[in-house]
Every structure is written in structure tokens, then in C-alpha cells.
Amino acid sequence: MARSLLSFTVLHRGCLQKTIYIRNHRLKFDTNPCNCFHIGRGLRTFCSSTSRLCNPGTRRIVTKGFRYRLRVAYDGTEFSGWQFQEKRRSVQGVLEQVLSKRLNRPVRIVGAGRTDSGVHAKGQVAHFDTDPFSDCPYLEYTLNRMLSGDVRVYDLQQKEPVSSDPRNNWHAIFSARKKIYSYRFSIAKELDPLERRFRFHFYRRCNLERLYDATKIFIGTHDFTSFCSRNTEMKEMEKNMCRTIYRLDIVHESDDNYRLEYELNGALYRMIRNITSSLFFVASGELTLDSLEEILHARDRRRAPKAAPAHGLCLERVVYDDY
């Protein structure tokens, strides 16, 4: 067949057959009488009628079309994190399922930051590629009607057509200039139960002046090896351990409620939670300012305290030149 480079015969529920033609890395369907299609070995298998990934281990489909970007807010309590994980509920997985069902084709979404399990976001940013559509506000509306109550998308925009040269494409990760995170905590005797999912209760003695002095140690560009939790996946990805913290403020929100606000060019794995924990140790008198500086320069994760709990952390915003 002249118009196709490669074809796959697809079985639908064991009875109907459809053929998928791959041409210029783009999926074409001869017919689509229903919303269910299964792609053969080597490609990701997706059932849009049930909104399930039938072969989650295969996660890459290369498509062309237009690039779309959007911001995402979510309560991370019931998620295993941003990144897709087989048999676990993730923000990326939920968004891909809903987008794929709504657009009637497999959609791969790329997020600016891979938040951990239990971490929240007000301004996560992601992009995806698909065929052009004219009504972004309506798509945003329908996506939010399909999503569960703990995740919402907003500010959906269309970018330029996807270029064959990746350097010309807007990218949620590589186009980002900086990120703003906050870590909310309370020094009250008792934590408001309505805050317990989003604020850490720092019940020990807290010297705010010492906490302020400790924040200044981290301003600037440093090797943050001592504050990077390592796992097998991250060992190869994070060879450059230097990051720049432009601003680290203590913001008084109300009564005994505060937040630490980080503005930085990027964060290593659990870096912010590890720094926050060390700041709390200084504020409680369990660690001196000199000891904190020594830990920073030691480049040894074993020297620093364990990470602060995830539920106090929130990705507030990802900053771009044009978004």
C-alpha cells in the first residue's frame, strides 16, 4: 500500500480487525468504530474505552503534530508521585489516561518536575503532542470534568508544530528557567487537623532567628551531594550535583504557620526535603551553623539528617520566558 511505510493488524476483542499505518512517525487509523485499539509488540498498548494501559512497560510512541502545554495542580496525598509507575496511581499516569481517552489516541505527557509520593503542586507544567484542535478552553473544561477531584489542569495553550529538530521545540523541562517550591510548617502546640495533609507539624522548640541564619548558608551555587538522596535510577541521571538557589525565604502565613520558599534553577532528588530537615535541626538546636556548613561542603549524604516529610512540600510554579 503506497501510503504506508509499515502496518500492523490489530485485533479488537478477538473479533474485529483494524490496521494501523505508521507514516512519518504518526499513527493513522483506517476505521475507528469504537474507542478501543490494541497496538502490537514494540509499541505501547492502550485501551481507550477502559482508559487503561494494557502494556504499561512500553511507554514510548513518537508522534508529530502540534505541541500543547498546560499547568497542573494536584493534592499529592493519594498519588505515588508524578512519574508513571506500573500498577500504582501517579499524576502522569492519570493525565495520560484521561488525555488519551478524550483525544481517542495514545498521548504521552512530559512534566517539568518529578514530584515524590505525597508532594503537592499548584503550578506543575507539562506538555504533550497531538493533532491540532481549535478549542483549548473546551478541552481544558472536559479534561477537568473527567479527572478526579484531587487533580486539575489549567492554562492549556497550543504551541508551534513539532519540529524534527528537538532544539526548536518548546519543552516543559528544558525550556524552564527556574522553579519555586514551598515547604509549609507549623510551630503551634497543636496542628489544625484541616492542615495535616499540607503542613508539617514542627512540634520541637523552634528558634526562628537561627532558622533564618541557616537559610543563608544555602544561597548561591553549591554542590548539593550531601542533600541528595540517591537511588539506582538517579545515580546515572544526576552526575552534576551543582544547583543554584536564588532565594530561600521564611514567610509568615498566619499565627504559628510558616513556609520556607525556595527559588532555584532545579533540584536534585529529595534535595529540598533534605535541606529543610537540616534547617529544622538548626532551629531546634540539634545542629550548629558551623556543622551545617561542614555538611554542605563534605559532599557526603550520610552526614545530613533524613528528609523532612513529603506532605509539607509543594511545587508552586515553574517559570518560563513565555509562560
Image: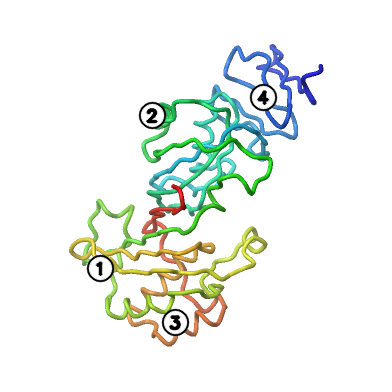
Camera-side residue of 55 and 21: 21
Q: Whole-Å distance between the Cαs marked 2 and 4?
A: 28 Å
Pointer 2 local density, CA inside 10 Å: few below 14, some 14–19, many at least 20: some
Q: Earlier in the sequence, mark 1 or mark 4?
A: 4
Residue 220 image offset from top left, x and y in percent: 46, 74
The residue mark sitting in front, 3 or 2, is 2
Could you say whether the residue bearing mark 3 is in a helix, strand or loop? helix
In this rendering, position of residue 310 left or right of residue 39 = left
Could you say whether the residue bearing mark 1 is in a helix, strand or loop? loop
Q: In which quadrant of the rendered image does the N terminus lie?
A: top right
Q: Earlier in the sequence, mark 3 or mark 1?
A: 1
For badge 4, the amino acid type reads His
Q: Whole-Å distance between the Cαs marked 3 and 4?
A: 55 Å
- Mark 4, residue position: 38
In this rendering, position of residue 24 left or right of residue 141 = right
For badge 2, the amino acid type reads Tyr
Residue 274 image offset from top left, x and y in percent: 46, 69
In this rendering, position of residue 307 left or right of residue 233 = left
- Mark 2, residue position: 141
Q: Whole-Å distance between the Cαs marked 3 and 2?
A: 48 Å
Q: Whole-Å distance between the Cαs marked 1 and 4?
A: 53 Å
Q: Which picture quadrant has residue 65? A: top right
Residue, far left: 255
The residue located at (25%, 68%) in the rendering is 187
- Mark 3, residue position: 292
Numbered circle sitting on residue 187: 1
